[in-house]
Image (cartoon, grey):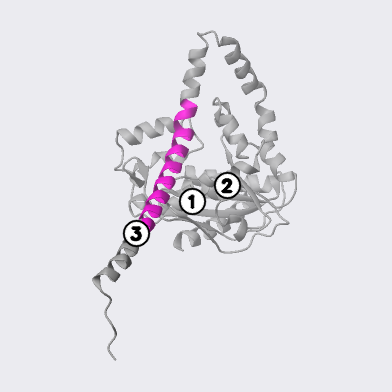
Amino acid sequence: MSQEIPSISEQIPILINLIVDDKRKSAKRFLKQVMELTAVALFLFSSLLVPLYCAILSVIGLFSPLLPVVILYGFLLFHDHKATLKRFGEKIGLRKWYAWQLIANYFPIKIRKTADLPADENYIIGCHPNGLGFFGSFISLCTDNTDFTISFPGIHSTLAVKNESFYIPFQREELMALGIIGMDNESIDQYLKEKAGKAVGIVVDYNADVSQLVSSEHGSHLKDRRDLIRLAFRHGAHLVPMYCSSDSKKSEQSHTNSENWLTETLKLVKNFVSWLPFFVDPNSWDGIFPERKQINCVFGPPISVSKNDDPSPEQVEEIYKRYCDELKKLVDI
């Protein structure tokens, strides 16, 4: 018995429903992309422009009726600096903001681990972001909107940045709210000694070529890594290499030919907003926004380091060699 073909009057509602469902899905997808783009734009604006505007307004305030307020804030900014680095002032709610999830989904940002990090130890993570990789370092270590807490249960992480970043008006409060700490022994001591299960990330070298990352030649990048190793000895914290890079071929190409006005401008801005080094790589940008390319954050296995306030050069070189070997494996993954 042949199947009865629906009449045109019966087919029209079905077609309308299909079109409406497709439009609804497209609208949701478009709205999601707009929200993600807005979150990235607000993050860049608040991180890059707001501190500069606040610094400029503070200077203008010196010649206005707000002079007493500016002087009082400046006094607190410098007098309370060390207390700021110790106190952190982290607000857990800020780490869980939905905006961070939108930024993580924008690229997206994925975490890959090669070994577990036991929660009964402390860790110093050497961050090696390439291209857009610093987004991965920041979102993974300073927010709770990636799979970091799932991949490494019981580990609380943060980033250490240059102390000068805490002298920028109102940027100090932003860093404190995220739990970011200063890159000095006193601040790291305070953070790691509270209890086990702490991990502090330090950006060692940014946008180095792969050949530089795995090279055994002496250079500024390697000097920074040896300082990182001495820091691990000082605190008796296990050392973990972390390599973050995007899938974009553009972000992996040489940067020697990218010296243009945008590059120079972003380098100048980086001197003021030093905790956001990804701004110096215009090759990874699509127009005025970063490319939507997946960022892979690969964590290496922990390298055991015993506490030693004065390690010998041989001890430093031994750990350094192991660190470079593990880092090379991450680059090759």
- Is 330 situated left or right of 2 in this image? right
Lower position in the chain sequence, tag 3 or tag 2: 3
Residue at the disc numbered 3? 20
Residue drawn at point x = 34 percent, y = 59 percent: 20
Mark 3 or 2, closer to the camera = 3
For badge 1, the amino acid type reads: Ala
- Is 83 situated left or right of 42 in this image? right
Residue drawn at point x = 60 percent, y = 44 percent: 95
Residue drawn at point x = 48 percent, y = 45 percent: 205
For disc 1, the neighbor class at 10 Å (few under 14, some 14 to 19, many from 20) is many
For badge 2, the amino acid type reads: Thr
Q: SS of the residue at dot 2?
A: loop
Boundaries of the magenta span: 24-52
Magenta-drawn stretch contains 28: yes
In space, the residues marked 3 and 2 are separated at their CA atoms by: 37 Å
Q: Quadrant of the N terminus?
A: bottom left
In space, the residues marked 1 and 3 are separated at their CA atoms by: 30 Å
Q: SS of the residue at dot 1?
A: helix
Per the rendering, the mark at residue 104 is: 1
Residue at the disc numbered 2? 143
Where residue 100 appears, x then y in whole percent?
Answer: 52, 46
**Image quarter for residue 287?**
top left
For badge 3, the amino acid type reads: Val
Magenta-drawn stretch contains 1: no
Q: SS of the residue at dot 3?
A: helix
